Image: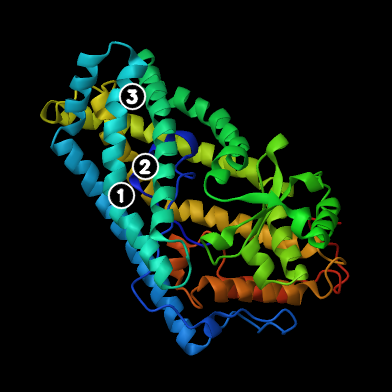
Amino acid sequence: MKALRARNLSSILLIFVAVCLFARVQTAAPQASPPPASSAAPSTANARAPEGYTLPPERAAQAVAYAHARYELYFVDFALSVVALLLLIRLAVAPKLRDWAERIARNGFLQAIIFGAPLLLVLGVLSLPVAAAGHSIERRFGQSVQTWGSWAWDWTKGQLVALALAIVLIWLLYLVIRRSPRRWWLYVWLALLPILVFLIFLEPLVLEPLFFRFTPLAATNPQLTLELERVVSRAGEQIPESRMYLMNASSKLNELNAYVTGIGASKRVVVWDTTIDRMSTPQILFVFGHEMGHYVLGHIPKGIAFAAALSLVFLFAAFHAIRWLVGRFGPAWKIRGVDDWASLPVLLLVLLIFDFAATPIGNAYSRHLEHQADQYGLEVVHRIVPDAPDVAAQSFQILGEVDLAEPSPSWAVKIWFYTHPPLNDRILFARSYDPWREGRSPEFVK
């Protein structure tokens, strides 16, 4: 997966659910010709991985250009989002929609639909140029093979899902604000956890199949299924063969992945067909072991707890910020109060800025969890995969070559953008981590 992230305006609405961790769009790099197929070929399964992450000079230059332009697009996206919200506030778009909604309906939920749908559609359309630029760059650098028609349909589906969810959230938000003007931030925060857990449960059952096709892994790769079951068994998890799936990532992407998703009855193993095409079975087992580590080490509940703590700070700060802003500028903006539907763009602007400022904190915590998952992956495939450290290093090298990962990101780039440790650090750790040879007990898998 890409080791950095960006957001569009519609994703800020889901801060109410998961502190802006859910709806994300990938941004990408500047225009360039796609690399020759030979230069994109990953390391062979039997080749010894280099001491650290390396790329040939031409490929390294492409990776740097790709990464730097994605960073630029990230900041452009943020700036345009701020400008768009400021324009909506300055032009009193929300008050006009509020007046329209109140004239048509008396029911609060119907007002939320009449007010929210047009406003969210405007925000979605304003985010479209950046999203399209990101897809264009992904195509030019060979990271995506998705046609524009398919991408447009996926974008539309994503907007419709976000729209439906956001309208419900807006209605609930203002219902709580109107019933508890002084403590709404606390009650909204308390509602985040069950909603987030429900979305994690629902994602593999409803959301992911909207964008990719999933088929039983055992039907096409029975031997790989058996090997994955060995890793699952050693991890102490219970995921039967019937919950192991192959995803047709190659219809849209060149990226590689194998992971565990869902929670409870929706938990399942997913392997991308691109991973099977580019990696050997031992390498797939390590990648999968890394992802399994997130579940076994409790990273999902820990991530929820971290998101909950951050959201509490966000919402409390937003409570005070929006009270001051509406009290100071409300008449000029034609906003009657915090409980007015028309205050929504102001709240979104506040949350967008808070989220942007907190990005390095979230990234640092994510890198910590990803490092633990790397360690767990090495431990769980020990004795299942021969020469696991070399296999892990090879896997990281392949991921970097396919995904055009930047060879030597600066410390500032790492702090602001990287949700995973840089690949060079991960390879060096994989090749050096061997507690068994040193007579020490592994930390996670005994």
- The residue sitting at the bottom extreme is 57
Q: In this view, does 39 lie to the left or right of 88?
A: right
- Residue type, label 2: Ser
Task: Report whether residue 14 is seen.
Answer: no
Q: In which quarter of the image is residue 375?
A: bottom right
Above or below 42: residue 194 = above
Q: Residues within 10 Å of mark 3 (few under 14, many from 20)?
A: many
Can you tell which mark lies on residue 353?
none
Q: Which mark is residue 127?
A: 1
Which of the two residues, 148 or 237, is positioned nearer the viewer here? 148
Closer to us: 171 or 245: 245
Give residue 113's mark. 3
Of labels 3 and 1, earlier in sequence is: 3
- Residue 143 visible in this rendered orientation of the protein: yes
- First along the sequence among labels 2 and 3: 2
Q: Name the residue under label 2.
A: 10
Secondary-structure class at tag 1: helix
Q: Give left or right: position of 170 versus 81.
A: right
Question: Measuring 74% from the left and 72% from the top, which residue is drawn there?
Answer: 280
Q: Which of the colour schemes (rainbow, by chain, secondary structure, one colour) is used?
A: rainbow
- Mark 2 and mark 1 residues within 8 Å of each other at the beta carbon: yes
CA distance for labels 2 and 3: 16 Å
Q: Whole-Å distance between the Cαs marked 3 and 1?
A: 20 Å
Instruction: Estimate the x, y position of residue 319 in percent, counting from the top left.
Output: 34, 29
Quadrant in which residue 221 is drawn = bottom right
Q: Which of 70 and 150 is in front in this view?
A: 150
Residue 222's place in the image compared with 438, above or below, is above
Point 42% across, 68% down: residue: 139
| Residue 8 screen position, x and y as percent | 36, 49
Q: In which quarter of the image is the C terminus?
A: bottom right
Considering the numbered disc 2 on the image, is that residue within a helix, a strand or a loop?
Answer: helix
Decide if residue 145 is on the left or right side of residue 179: right
